[in-house]
Structures are given as structure tokens and as C-alpha cells.
Image (cartoon, grey):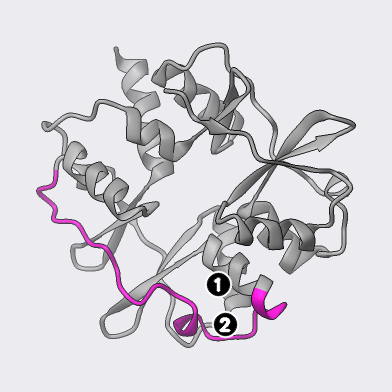
Amino acid sequence: MDGSDIISLDCSSTVLDTIFFMKRNKIRRIVVTCEGKMAGLFTVDEAIKQIIGGSVEDKLKDTKLKRLVNVESNEPYEIAKSMIANSVDAVIFSRRIITEKDLVRGFPWNDEEKMFDLAVKAIAIEGFTRLSTAAEIMVRNSIRHLPVAEEQPLGMLSARDVVYRFSDRLSLQEEVKLVMVPYLVKGDKTLSLREGTEIMMSKGIGSLVFEDQGLYIVTLKDLVKHIYMYSMKY
């Protein structure tokens, strides 16, 4: 599991400049450096917190960054353990960054376990909900994906959608139905973990939704937790 090249910005950059940079480069996290040394991770999670509760004019050095976690092994179980123990969605290995998506993509999932067994009840919002309200829900519940539904499922709003839209409008006053991805990628309850993760990777999505008298969701974070729990059992 090799990961990707590290993309970084100096800690003298403002939050707003960083958000612009992230959208321009189609990334959701960046390594922050101070005086040439890696200082932490700034992700869409930190961006949303700054947008709704801080200032986008703050410099990165004055914001609360995610901890930068270095691992000595790129073995999947060790990576999952480090992510869970440190509440991060990426780790550094051999001067490269390995993300939740990299870990899920590279793990040998089986056909015996069902993906729906990992699903949790989704927090859903309505299409007329303001982006600012959706952002607050994400921060309050430490989630990045909100299915949008009224009488029927309408789409999906992600933390990245919120941050990228803010970079365009410098406001979160729009209704989510104008910003969301206008469809849900849904899975069948019979999907195996291998099949479910293959769908997520092929679609480039961070969550898969299931319908069962309501909406249920499995995210990359849930899959990383499962890798960690699997390693604890064996």
C-alpha cells in the first residue's frame, strides 16, 4: 500500500486560500508545514469548522489541525489501528500519505460478510435545509455525508460539497438541493463487503446507502473500523 505524494501548504496560508487551493486541486485534505516541517493535517472537516465557527481569514498556524500520524508499517491492520486510535483519516508512511480510501481500496475484502451488517441509521436532511445548517449537523455529529430526502431520497451532500460551494459563493445560505449530488448510490442488502467496496471505489464515493424502512449508510470510516476490529479478533 503505497499511498500518494504529499501535497502541502505553508502554515502562513489563510484558511480561505487553502479552501481555494483544495478545490482547484480536487483534494479534501492537505499537509500543513511550518518552517519546512510537517505540522498537521487540514481537511474539509477543519474547513467547515472554520467556516461556521471561526474565520476563514485565520492563518493555518492559528487553527486546530488534525494530528499528523507517522506509521512505520504500511500493513493494513497497523494503518487502521493508527487511524482509529488518533481519530484521523490519513497517515504518513515513508514520506507519502495513505488515506482511508487507499486503505479500503487495498484491503482484501471477503465475500462472506455482508456490507449491510456495518450500516448505521443515516442522519438525513430535507432539500430546503440551508447549507449552514447542514454544516452544523456534520460538525455536531462528526460525519461527512448527509443523505437528502423528502418523500423520496433526493441525493447526497458531502462535506467536500459544502466546502467547495463556499469557495464559489463565500456563503452557506443556499438550500442543499442546489448543491447536493442529485442521486444516491444505493446498495442491495445482499452485497458482500467485497462487492460493496468495489462499488464505492468504482463510483469514487465515500459512502454507500441502503434502504430498509429508512436510510442506512456505510462510510469509509466504518470500513476502516471494521478492518481494525477484524485485526483485534485475529
Q: Are marks 2 and 1 in contact (CB under 8 Å)?
A: yes
| Residue visible at 35% across and 17% down in the picture | 231
Asked whether 228 or 102 is in front, the reply is 102
Circle number at residue 189: none
Residue type at the position of mark 1: Ala
Tell me which residue sits at (65%, 76%) in the image: 168
* Amino acid type at image mark 2: Arg
Determine crowd level at label 1: few under 14, some 14-19, many 20+ residues with C-alpha closer than 10 A. many
Rendered image quadrant of residue 113: top left
Residue at which label 2 appears: 130
Read off the residue under disc 1.
134
Please determine whether, in this image, residue 86 is positioned above or below residue 116.
above
Name the quarter where the N terminus is drawn: top left
176 over 214 or under it: above or below: below
Q: Is residue 178 magenta?
A: yes
Classify mark 1: helix, strand or loop: helix
User: Where does the image place residue 233, in percent across and percent down from the top left?
Assistant: 31, 16
* Crowd tier of the residue under label 2, counting other residues whose Cα lies within 10 Å: few below 14, some 14–19, many 20 or above: some
The magenta stretch is 168-191
Residue at x 35%, y 27% (from the top left corner): 227
Q: CA distance from mark 2 to mark 1?
A: 6 Å
Say which of 108 and 87 sits in front: 108
Q: Quadrant of residue 159?
A: bottom right
* Position of residue 77 measured from the top left corner of the image (x, y, whole percent): 41, 19
